[in-house]
Image (spheres, rainbow, N blue to C red):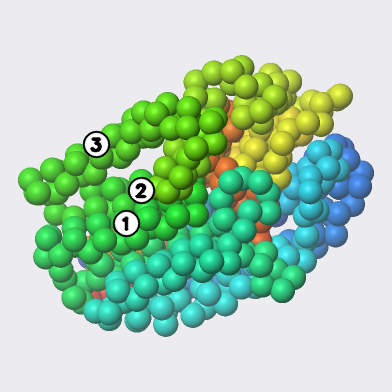
Amino acid sequence: MAIFRKKENIPTETTDEEIVYVEDKSDRFITHAVIFEILMAGIVFLKSSDAGTQYLIALAPMLVITGILGNYFYQKSADMKLFAACCYLISMGIGLQLLIDEIYNPAGSFSLIKYGIAILLAAVFIIFYSFFRNILNHRATVYVMMGVSLAIYLALAVFGYDPNGYGTSAWISIGPLTLQLTDFTKVSALLFYASLFSSRYRKDERTVLLLSTLFFLINAAGSLLIHEMGSLMILFVLHLALLFIFMEHSRRKRIYLITVFSLCAIAVVSAFVLYHALQPAHEAGTLSGISAYIWPIVRKVYERFSVTANIYNDPYGAGYQLLQGKKALWMGGLSGNTVNFHAIPVAESDMAFVAMITTLGFPIAFFALIQLARIAVRGGEVSLKLLKKNPQDAVVAFGAAAMLFMQALIVILGSCNIIPLTGLPIPFLSRGFTYQTITLCFAGILLKLSMENEEEIMEVPDEEQ
């Protein structure tokens, strides 16, 4: 007997003589999520009794929330595979962070209370998403989102600071809270592009390219102002992806996308040229004016690419983090291996995937990758189904799924020394109150849109009949 039952069966096939009902078995994904959360408790406890005890404290409310939300989304015909993927990643992230506190001794400790607050804030945002959706249909919203992004960067330029020594002033302190405001630029970007492609006020091709370019330039200038390259990379990929997918095919669009990508490549090459041109003046201490300002930017770009090419050029400086990560990858094995190796820098944030391999092993790490890919695929399917009915919601669904997956992929590849390291958190797996709140908001929006999408699809046959 199934634990969760829908109020009504769904007719899936109609003939002249009868209506055939097929039982919906998607409630099994709720059970799968609950079982996995319990299994994670055993795995974490085997690795560390202290971390296991902390996980057990979180397990009871976790199971209650999974059951309540799972039943709600199931009744609303949401994408239960997407729901299960989010539950898997959340439980893995909590277990991983508790183990990191016990093994790697990070600067701060993981707070289950903050995580609970993040869940509540995400729930409030999702509840009021319908209000935000109505705002997106106003003509002025695209300009408001431009102003919001500009205000964020100006606030960081004046009040921002770097608590972790990353070389970027992306954080701001408000009383006891430390917020990474650059994470909110991802939210403003999602709302901007959703409003830009609003079905109520369709804009011509030239206007879309002009406004989207202006918005990207605001983010590019702001990122350079505070020396934040990681978020800029995410917004750059999002900019090109949304224009490529949601704009109609045309020669102007192709030329634009090729030009923007080429300019980005030229900018990276120019950073290398400027680094070698300015290095003598830097060593002599004679940098001044614009040269003194752009030097930290070109040095950061040069170091990220050069260290990726050869981490042994500076094994105890710029390459130390990646070198320790490489050692950890070799030691991980099937069940993890942390014996006599507790030296992964920033294991709680951008190196969380490497820390997952060493603490939990390759199988669980690959399972996390599969779930992140599932979010991308299911989010893409939701966006595709919404495209004809509501392009605005389709943009939100695609943008939320893309930013979750892109950021995870870029950070994971960087921590494995395949591409330059960005220094960003990994969705679901890393700690960080600000970004995890936004991650949960994006995941909740995807589930809400999948729920509404299924309802709309079910109504179509009735209207046709």
Q: CA distance from mark 3 to mark 1?
A: 15 Å
Q: Residue type at mark 2: give it.
A: Phe
Mark earlier in primary sequence (2, 3): 2
Residue 237 placement (x, y as % from top left): 36, 46
**Point 70% across, 21% down: residue:** 327
Name the residue that disc number 3 marks: 262
* Quarter of the image with the N terminus in it: bottom right
Residue with the mark numbered 1 = 216
Q: x, y (%) of residue 232?
A: 42, 49
Locate residue 291: give its quadrant.
top left
Q: Is residue 177 visible?
A: yes
Q: Are marks 1 and 2 in contact (CB under 8 Å)?
A: yes
Q: Is residue 170 above or below residue 344?
A: below
Q: Quadrant of the C terminus?
A: bottom left
Q: Helix or strand or loop: what does disc 1 sit on?
A: helix
Q: CA distance from mark 1 to mark 2?
A: 7 Å
* Foreground of the two, 245 or 335: 245
Residue 84, given in percent of the width and then of the height, sits at: 58, 53
Amino acid of disc 3 = Ser
Mark 3 crowd level (few <14, some 14–19, many ≥20, 10 Å Cα): few
Q: Residue 365's image quarter?
A: top right
Q: Nearer the viewer, residue 235 or 278?
A: 278
| Viewer-closest of 148 and 457 | 148
Residue type, mark 1 in image = Phe
- Residue in the image at 42% along x and 58% along y: 222
Q: Are marks 3 and 1 in contact (CB under 8 Å)?
A: no
Q: Which residue is mark 2?
A: 236
Residue 78 at x, y percent in the picture: 47, 63
First reached walking from the N terminus: tag 1 or tag 2: 1
- Label 2 vs label 3, nearer the camera: 3
